[in-house]
């Protein structure tokens, strides 16, 4: 396996980073590079980009914003139907959100931090291409999560693919009562 990965790395198709865990040696995490995407044709990304640009050209920024609001409302209804209520333990709400995100193809996972907070980690983003031409899509997603997790929860992005990170990571915490 290492020989195959070394060859793919030489060709610029994969790259890795070492990630420290709580114990033991760092784990080597491999990922495809943008160059590797050429080997996996996918018209969904270009279609999404073309649609975002066409909506903006036809209806302006306000039209695009309205379209994103409709999408967010539909996703909110879908998520609310499956999410536990705001009184459920935060762990259960985060776990359910991660499952919903996995079902959407985002390769989501979650972990609890030592301080009681949580991380929601997305190792793949199904909206990455469209977000490059319309970053507001990411903002809509983040707003959706804040709504379904409940008003007593803060959600902050700590890593973002659009910033060049290999994944998107969100820190989720219950707010202190005032």
Image: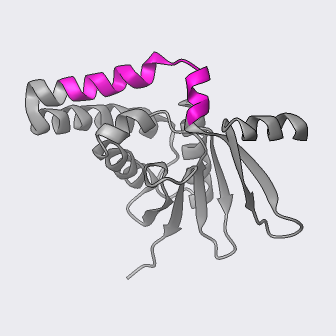
Residue situated in front as seen by the camera: 173 or 127: 127
Q: Residue at 51% of width from left, 19% of height from top? A: 42
Q: Is residue 36 magenta?
A: yes
The answer to whether any part of residue 53 appears in the image is: yes
Residue 77 placed where, x, y %? 37, 34
Is residue 156 depicted above or below 129 in this figure? Answer: below
Query: Which quarter of the rendering shows the C terminus?
Result: bottom left
Residue situated in front as seen by the camera: 158 or 177: 158
Q: Residue at 44% of width from left, 38% of height from top? A: 128
Q: Is 128 placed left or right of 7 in the picture? A: left
The answer to whether any part of residue 1 appears in the image is: no
How many marks on residues? Answer: 0
Q: Is residue 50 magenta?
A: yes
Residue 145 placed where, x, y %? 42, 50
Magenta-tinted stretch: 35-54
Q: Main secondary structure of the magenta part?
A: helix
Q: Residue at 74% of width from left, 41% of height from top? A: 9
Residue situated in front as seen by the camera: 132 or 8: 8
Image quadrant of residue 61?
A: top left
Is residue 92 depicted above or below 100 in this figure? Answer: below
Query: Which quarter of the rendering shows the N terminus?
Result: top right
Image quadrant of residue 62?
A: top left
């Amino acid at each position: 396996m290492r020989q195959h990965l070394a060859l793919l790395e030489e060709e610029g198709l994969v790259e890795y980073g070492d990630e420290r865990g709580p114990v033991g040696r760092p784990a080597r995490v491999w990922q495809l590079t943008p160059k590797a995407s050429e080997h996996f044709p996918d018209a969904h990304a270009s279609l999404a980009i073309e649609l975002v640009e066409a909506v903006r050209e036809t209806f302006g920024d306000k039209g695009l914003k309205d379209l994103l609001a409709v999408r967010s409302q539909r996703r909110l209804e879908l998520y609310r139907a499956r999410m536990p209520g705001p009184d459920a333990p935060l762990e259960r709400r985060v776990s359910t959100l991660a499952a919903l995100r996995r079902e959407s193809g985002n390769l989501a996972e979650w972990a609890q931090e030592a301080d009681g907070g949580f991380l929601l980690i997305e190792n793949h983003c199904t909206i990455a291409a469209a977000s490059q031409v319309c970053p507001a899509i990411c903002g809509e997603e983040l707003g959706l999560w804040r709504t379904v997790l409940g008003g007593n929860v803060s959600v902050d992005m700590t890593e973002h693919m659009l910033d060049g990170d290999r994944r998107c990571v969100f820190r989720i915490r219950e707010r202190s009562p005032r």
